[in-house]
Amino acid sequence: MAAVVQPLLGVKVIEFCHVAAGPFCGMLLADFGAQVVKIEPPEGDAMRQWPPLSEGYSENFASLNRGKQSVVLDLKNPQQVAQARALVLEADVLIENSRPGVMRRLGLGWDWFGPRKASLVYCSISAYGQDGPRGPEGGFDLTIQASAGVMSVTGEPDGAPVKAGVPLVDFTAGLYAAFTIAAMVARVRGGWPGGQLDVPMFSTTIAVSALQTSEYFGTGRNPRKLGSAHPRNAPYQAYRASDGWFAVAAGNNKLWQQVCELTPVPELMDDARFSTPTLRAANQAALAVLLEARFVQQPVAHWLGTFGPAGVPSAPINGYAEALADPQAQYLELVQPMALPNGVQTRTVGGPVKIDGAVVAVNTRPPALGEHTQQVLAALSGADRADT
């Protein structure tokens, strides 16, 4: 099979980002072939200090910064700000995730670049956007999950507020930013100008809550917490077996019939409370009690072996060790080797999509702090090395 031609090959990105949302966006662009130059302060991106540390190098940092070049610049130094400007003027894309106003005060805002480079795609990721009543506020994944509604529908019905275990706010914003940048790059390649992108984590989080917002629009009521259950389908949640938990998603009448036959609880087929998906969802607490009375009589493996071959979607509650060891994860080539700059050999999750049937090969090596400073600055054209 021919190698995949990386769709962003030849695109140069300058990343002024730290921690998660912006670096994830930059990594996605690097995975698709863009040259991503990460500008870091002398102390480095704060995530470089996050454990686990493998001989001093953060594996958390490595997981979001593979395939990039690291250039150290002190943006409080006017000469180094001029170098940063020069790098951007030779690039196609700028990504930043500082609080609104910070890049402008540094002399690196859209107000400076826009008049000088019409083709530049300038992407700002922030908590609430570049303007508006909450624009100046900062925020992290937790606080945006809280303000954007996610925590109101996460957890058990009578439990304390909890956040999603994955930092979905950061990565949703990074994904929106990356595909919008890719769309803008395509526009620029078609002869149109670039532009300024404003990616608020607040709005991208609400945007992926389409089922919850539509429930509110349709009913006038806030969606509620249901634990692992579903507001419109049942049985569709985690259930207890004799030795642990497993999940079943019987989201239509045919699958419901199979669950009744295989459990077996044929009497539930004639129970008026459970005759449609809507009624089963409305009475799912009572349904869970009746089903678990049978499920706890057998181990998880029994139920997976019963439902799976019959086509009823079901799964164990995996940890990441088990998920990464799944035969399908191996088939999809998700786990890839990674060499850290200090020589430590580790692993990472590679590109999750295929193009023309092939996994996109990504450069998994993350940079050492400032590893590419001299190389990248030396490559600037003579005119751009001077104060700009």
Image (cartoon, helix red, strand yellow):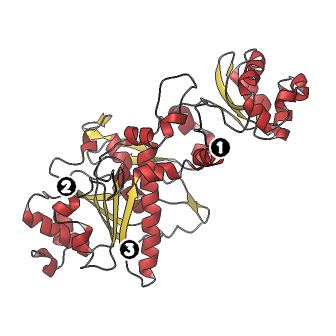
378 vs 180, left or right, is left
- x%, y% of residue 205? 47, 48
**Residue type indicated by callout 2:** Gly
Q: CA distance from mark 1 to mark 2?
A: 54 Å
Upstream in the sequence, badge 2 or badge 3? 3
- x%, y% of residue 136? 28, 52
Q: Are marks 3 and 1 in contact (CB under 8 Å)?
A: no
326 vs 51, left or right, is right
- x%, y% of residue 202? 42, 49
Quick one: quadrant of the N terminus? bottom right
- In what element is the residue under mark 3? loop
320 vs 214, left or right, is left
Q: Residue at x 38, y 67 (%)?
A: 34
Can residue 170 be seen? Answer: yes
**Residue type indicated by callout 3:** Gly
Q: Which residue is mark 2?
A: 370
Closer to viewer: mark 3 or mark 1: 1
Q: Which residue is mark 3?
A: 10
Numbered label tally? 3
Say if 24 sits above or below 47 in the image.
below
Q: Which residue is mark 1?
A: 219
Query: Mark 2 Cα within 10 Å, few/some/many (few <14, many 20+)?
Result: some
Q: CA distance from mark 2 to mark 3?
A: 22 Å
Query: Mark 3 Cα within 10 Å, few/some/many (few <14, many 20+)?
Result: few
- In what element is the residue under mark 2? loop
**Residue type indicated by callout 1:** Thr
Judging depth in this view, the residue of 87 and 180 nearest the camera is 180
Q: CA distance from mark 3 to mark 1?
A: 49 Å
Closer to viewer: mark 1 or mark 2: 1
